[in-house]
């Protein structure tokens, strides 16, 4: 069924993901996102984090040459579970530290989107930006405060 995932890849996955991530970041930078490694992050309402993270597929699991885009929102009170006074805020948070987590594709009601790095980067970039603009950023706008 997923035999195409098991094929060995002769592409430079790091370079391709860098190119894709860089283009997506340039698109999101005006919205206040900053880049930290493979993570794009912004704070809203002072300390609520909104995260977009690019994750490579594991070759040992037959996912070499593929990647997905993880999404997250971190609400400090829900993450820390201590309900104490404010703790020191980090510079950025990882997707796995988020309270609400998903992957690109599922936000639009479809299956998780795994992108094949053998395809043209411009098509992948256009697809990611479309999903972010149509589904993720509007959800992030709704979920940008405690109200």
Image: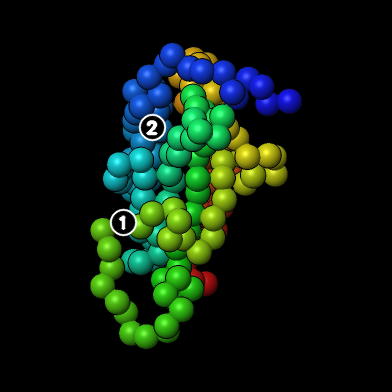
Q: Residue at x 36, y 36 (%)?
A: 25
Q: Tag on residue 26?
A: none
Q: How dense is the environment of label 1, judged by Cα within 10 Å: few (below 14), some, or many (20 and up)?
A: some
Q: In the picture shown, does residue 47 fall above or below 63?
A: below
Q: Position of residue 139 (x, y in %)?
A: 56, 52
Q: Which residue lies at the image location 54% right of the left edge and 30% below the top edge?
A: 63
Residue situated furthest bottom in the rendering: 84
Picture coordinates of residue 109, whole percent (x, y): 70, 44
Mark 2 crowd level (few <14, some 14–19, many ≥20, 10 Å Cα): many
Q: CA distance from mark 1 to mark 2?
A: 17 Å
Q: Position of residue 66 (x, y in %)?
A: 51, 28
Q: Is residue 34 left or right of residue 126?
A: left
Q: Which residue is mark 1?
A: 92
- The residue labelled by disc 2 is 21
**Residue at figure coordinates x 48%, y 73% from the top left:** 78
Please give the count of numbered marks on the rendered protein. 2
Instruction: Please state the horizontal and vertical placement of residue 51, each as a whole percent of the image.
Output: 42, 51
Q: Is residue 59 visible?
A: yes
Which part of the image, by quadrant, shows the N terminus? top right
């Amino acid at each position: 069924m997923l035999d195409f995932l098991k094929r060995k890849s002769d592409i430079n996955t790091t370079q391709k993901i860098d190119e894709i991530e860089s283009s997506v970041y340039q698109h999101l930078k005006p919205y206040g996102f900053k880049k930290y490694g493979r993570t794009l992050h912004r704070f809203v309402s002072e300390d609520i984090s909104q995260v977009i993270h690019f994750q490579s597929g594991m070759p040992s699991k037959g996912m070499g040459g593929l990647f997905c885009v993880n999404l997250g929102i971190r609400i400090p009170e829900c993450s820390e579970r201590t309900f104490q006074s404010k703790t020191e805020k980090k510079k950025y948070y990882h997707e796995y530290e988020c309270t609400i987590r998903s992957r690109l594709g599922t936000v639009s009601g479809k299956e998780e989107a795994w992108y094949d790095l053998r395809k043209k980067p411009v098509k992948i970039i256009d697809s990611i930006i479309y999903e972010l603009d149509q589904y993720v950023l509007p959800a992030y706008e709704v979920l940008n405060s405690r109200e």
